[in-house]
Image (tube, rainbow, N blue to C red):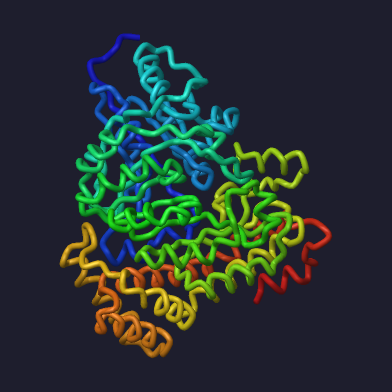
């Protein structure tokens, strides 16, 4: 095969079939965006690609694929919830005679299945294997699998090619400062995929990337941004003068370092997601998340909120120690601690996790539609709960939590802290502010729903008293609007999804056929 002077490459992120609560579709639509975030993998892979490639990045959440444009080669990244769509895209391109390379976590742990749809796959991190893959492609010697046992140092990273993405359609851009995790939670993939020792980028390299971003609204995609406290402190000092607005994930031991937490607040952090997972000690033990100290939760939440940072509480229900009452326990805990934002998840056994291996041996994995494998829908055989009952309890709890009177009380109590005050939000234009406020007036004030009006007036009252800023209140109301949009979405798709779940609902606790029929028709 004779090498050409230039090649065309399409890098694709497939669309997911079913939504996730934090997709925030309604917020995006109001603000004229398409998606809250864009996969960092594709701009990163583009940055690793030689200069003689003409690259087009296609995120199906932003734009559709035009198969009339025929590149020389296609790269597709895939997670579990979009793997079915990824295979469809791969099959379509291969039918056109175009070679397809696939990568991502799902592909890395399902090699045989993925090779039925792709010409080759890249396993794990791409820094060393992707350039070799392209070189072999140019020579007509493309191999089936590209993998390495040596993890990249990750001290320096090429700046992601955001110039290839329409960032005006995205709410926030992702930044990664480290890979790996020192912990070994049974349900988590990170320590198996990226290793337990965390590898950190040089701080200058991170700051150079941030300074070159086309947006100042960012999300740190590290699974634990503050694991290394010395690095985290240096990062905060470097971020402080950049006038950013950002969010991150961190382990809860951060609350043992109030000086670092204060530095995080001053550096522009608006919210931190903490993986509380459970308030049941037996479930924490089962998950091997022994770094979580449940007795510190309440004190720590109040400390973070006192800094003017929203706590996003992430919880999982479905551990072997859990019963359906776990949902009520989480609801009561969040209500008691004024947690306005939660990520409520159902236990999933992702391929590549230790949990997946255990449940596979116990024959508790269901061969369910991969589109449902998003951490929302019950997809495994639980110890004390039927999948159908868990499904209904999950959405009942989500609706109860986002009841307008309930979130009004939580938000009012949380925002009484005068540090929840931001004069400016990064990347929010005057046009954005006008559109969002107009929407909220129409949505919350000019309505017959007394609960919605009461919430709007209470929160605006805090602004008028100088307790919090209009930006904080607008963001909160937009988020709640979007969560209610998600609940409406689930009602439209509930019957379709439940049919897929109920066929695998087995065990001594499973619903009778008559009960299933009643649940489906009510």
Q: Is residue 92 above or below residue 62?
A: above
Q: How far across and how far down the image is residue 35, in percent? A: 34, 55
Q: Residue at x 42, y 46 (%)?
A: 226
Frontmost residue, 93 versus 172: 172
Residue occupying the far top of the picture: 2
Q: How far across and how far down the image is residue 208, in percent? A: 22, 37
Q: Residue at x 54, y 52 (%)?
A: 374
Q: Give the position of the C terminus as an image quadrant.
A: bottom right
Q: Residue at x 20, y 46 (%)?
A: 214
Q: Give the position of the N terminus as an image quadrant.
A: top left
Frontmost residue, 195 versus 336: 336
Looking at the image, residue 102 sits to the left or right of residue 325; the answer is left
Residue occupying the far right of the picture: 508
Looking at the image, residue 17 sits to the left or right of residue 217; the answer is right
Q: Is residue 208 above or below residue 278?
A: above
Frontmost residue, 517 versus 188: 188
Residue 118 visible in the shown view: yes
Q: Is residue 1 above or below residue 416?
A: above
Residue 97 visible in the shown view: no
Q: How far across and how far down the image is residue 215, in percent? A: 22, 50
Q: Residue at x 21, y 64 (%)?
A: 424
Q: Quadrant of residue 324?
A: bottom right
Looking at the image, residue 393 sits to the left or right of residue 37; the answer is right
Q: How far across and how far down the image is residue 306, in percent? A: 39, 67
Q: Is residue 192 above or below residue 243?
A: above
């Amino acid at each position: 095969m004779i090498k050409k002077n230039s090649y065309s490459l399409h890098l694709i992120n497939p669309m997911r079939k079913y939504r996730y609560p934090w997709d925030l579709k309604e917020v995006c639509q109001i603000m004229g965006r398409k998606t809250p975030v864009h996969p960092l993998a594709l701009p990163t892979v583009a940055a690793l690609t030689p200069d003689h490639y003409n690259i087009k990045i296609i995120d199906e959440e932003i734009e559709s694929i035009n198969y009339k444009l025929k590149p020389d080669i296609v790269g597709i990244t895939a997670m579990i919830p979009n793997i079915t769509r990824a295979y469809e895209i791969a099959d379509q391109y291969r039918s056109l005679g175009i070679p397809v390379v696939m990568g991502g976590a799902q592909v890395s742990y399902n090699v045989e299945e993925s090779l039925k749809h792709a010409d080759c796959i890249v396993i794990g991190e791409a820094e060393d294997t992707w350039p070799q893959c392209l070189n072999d492609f140019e020579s007509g010697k493309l191999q089936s699998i590209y993998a390495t046992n040596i993890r990249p140092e990750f001290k320096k990273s090429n700046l992601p090619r955001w110039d290839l993405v329409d960032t005006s359609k995205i709410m926030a851009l992702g930044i990664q400062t480290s890979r790996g995790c020192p912990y070994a939670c049974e349900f988590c993939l990170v320590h198996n995929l990226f290793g337990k020792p965390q590898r950190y980028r040089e701080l200058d390299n991170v700051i150079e990337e941030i300074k070159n971003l086309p947006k100042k609204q960012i999300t740190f995609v590290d699974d634990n941004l503050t694991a290394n406290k010395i690095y985290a402190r240096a990062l905060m000092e470097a971020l402080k003068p950049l006038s950013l607005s950002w969010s991150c994930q961190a382990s809860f031991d951060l609350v043992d370092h109030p000086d670092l937490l204060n530095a995080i607040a001053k550096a522009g952090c608006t919210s931190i997601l903490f993986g509380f997972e459970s308030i049941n000690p037996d479930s924490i033990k089962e998950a091997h998340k022994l770094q979580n100290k449940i007795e510190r939760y309440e004190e720590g939440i109040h400390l973070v909120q006192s800094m003017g940072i929203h706590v996003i509480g992430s919880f999982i229900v479905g551990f072997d120690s859990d019963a359906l009452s776990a949902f009520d326990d989480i609801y009561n805990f969040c209500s008691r601690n004024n947690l306005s934002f939660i990520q409520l998840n159902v236990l999933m056994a992702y391929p590549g996790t230790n949990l997946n291996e255990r449940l596979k041996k116990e024959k508790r994995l269901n061969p369910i539609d991969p589109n449902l494998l998003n951490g929302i829908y019950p997809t495994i055989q639980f110890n004390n709960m039927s999948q159908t009952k868990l499904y209904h309890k999950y959405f009942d709890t989500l609706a109860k939590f986002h009841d307008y009177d309930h979130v009004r009380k939580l938000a009012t109590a949380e925002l009484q802290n005068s540090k929840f005050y931001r004069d400016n939000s990064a990347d929010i234009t005057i046009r954005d502010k006008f559109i969002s406020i107009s929407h909220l007036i129409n949505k919350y004030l000019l309505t017959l729903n007394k609960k919605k009006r009461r919430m709007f007036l209470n929160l605006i009252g805090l602004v008028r008293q100088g307790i919090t800023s209009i930006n904080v209140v607008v963001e909160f109301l937009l988020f709640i609007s979007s969560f209610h949009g998600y609940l409406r979405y689930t009602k439209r798709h509930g019957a379709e999804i439940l049919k897929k779940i109920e066929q695998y609902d087995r065990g001594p606790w499973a619903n009778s056929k008559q009960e299933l029929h009643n649940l489906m028709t009510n």
